[in-house]
Amino acid sequence: MADCGKTPIVQRSATADNQSRSTAMKQTDEHSSLKEHRAPLEEDQAPLRELDEWDDFVATRYRQGKSEEEFRNYKADANPTVTEFYRQNHKYQTLDFVLEKKAEYCGLKRGQKSIWEMADYLNTLVDDSDPDTDVTQIEHLLQTAEAIRKEGHPRWFILAGFLHDLGKVLCLYGEPQWAVVGDTFPVGCAYSEQVVFPEFFATNPDGSKSEYQTPYGIYEPNCGLDSVHLSFGHDEYIFRVTQKYLPEQAQYMLRYHSFYAAHRHGAYRHLMNEHDEAMFEWVRKFNPYDLYSKGRERPNTKEILPYYRELVSEFFPDKIDW
Ligand SMILES: [Fe+2]
Ligand SMILES: [Fe+2]
């Protein structure tokens, strides 16, 4: 294990949650909350070696300078584990599943913790097999935030970069990979061909419910994304946790940063309202920092941490609800 990225940011003792970490990436019978939606036992619910494998795939998919033809061939960039991950994600993210997870997590009833305690907790989610090449979760957050800071953006924008993937702690809560990461998409209405691997929706039980398969499904035309349920994952969770402390532009960045079909490909505009359209400018502004800051040098955590401590305390109280 590499020392550099894993030094705890705050000292904390082991918790029950931490003890479950070793099983967080591989689902077991212990996670009773998943009973109804859990895939058959023979299915490996953690096909990705690490969550970053999905992020890396997305970054490759939208590699800068990629031609349109190369882009359309994105499946060639997906290794079998990423493909299997999307197969599960598209199969199990039903409207019922999303509503159940929102009821479970969006009331923020898991107790109070500081942003730093959560960042430190998230940092325990790292691939131990390859410590030299992988940046830790907190390093990805700092790299994203630093890239934003270098270009002179407002403090709330930098903070959004630092926070954007903290919702991945869902994986440490015991959620399977397909409920934590992956491109997000609306449920309860027809799937867009602009979502990656659209053919995998054929196995989603919602696909055979005709009321969910019209363009608007359960929604009204241009009802606004706040009324639309997206597939559940780290975006929605961190949005809910931080919502009341951040300006709206930052809320949109956090909530929709994995909604590539919309912010990259212009899909689902029939569900968006004018306010969403205006706010998506900020989602698009944010996206390159998430995608392209990873290759840069590792941030000097010790040196920049005081800046981020001050930034976090400017917007957040010591402890917030999770
Ligand atoms: Fe993310
Ligand atoms: Fe990210």
Image (cartoon, rainbow, N blue to C red):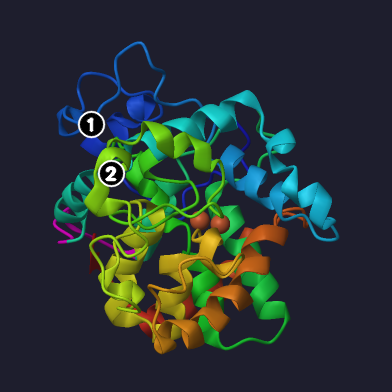
Query: Considering the numbered disc 1 on the image, is that residue within a helix, a strand or a loop?
Result: loop
> Which callout, 2 or 1, points at the residue further toward the start of the chain?
1
Q: Nearer the viewer, residue 6 or 70?
A: 70
Magenta-span inclusion, residue 68: no
- Disc sitting over residue 139 in the figure: none
Residue on which disc 1 sits: 37
Residue on which disc 2 sits: 94
- The secondary structure that most of the magenta stretch takes on is loop
Q: Are marks 2 and 1 in contact (CB under 8 Å)?
A: yes
Q: Nearer the viewer, residue 313 or 220?
A: 220
Is residue 204 something one can see in this rendering?
yes
Seen at 66% across and 40% down, the residue is: 134
Seen at 40% across and 67% down, the residue is: 255
Drawn side of residue 26 relative to residue 289, left or right: left
Seen at 36% across and 42% down, the residue is: 179
Q: Nearer the viewer, residue 184 or 30?
A: 184
Query: Considering the numbered disc 2 on the image, is that residue within a helix, a strand or a loop?
Result: loop
Q: Residues within 10 Å of mark 2 (few under 14, many from 20)?
A: many
> Marks 2/1: CA distance?
9 Å
For the record, the magenta segment spans 107-114
Drawn side of residue 123 relative to residue 149, left or right: left
Q: Quadrant of residue 68?
A: bottom right
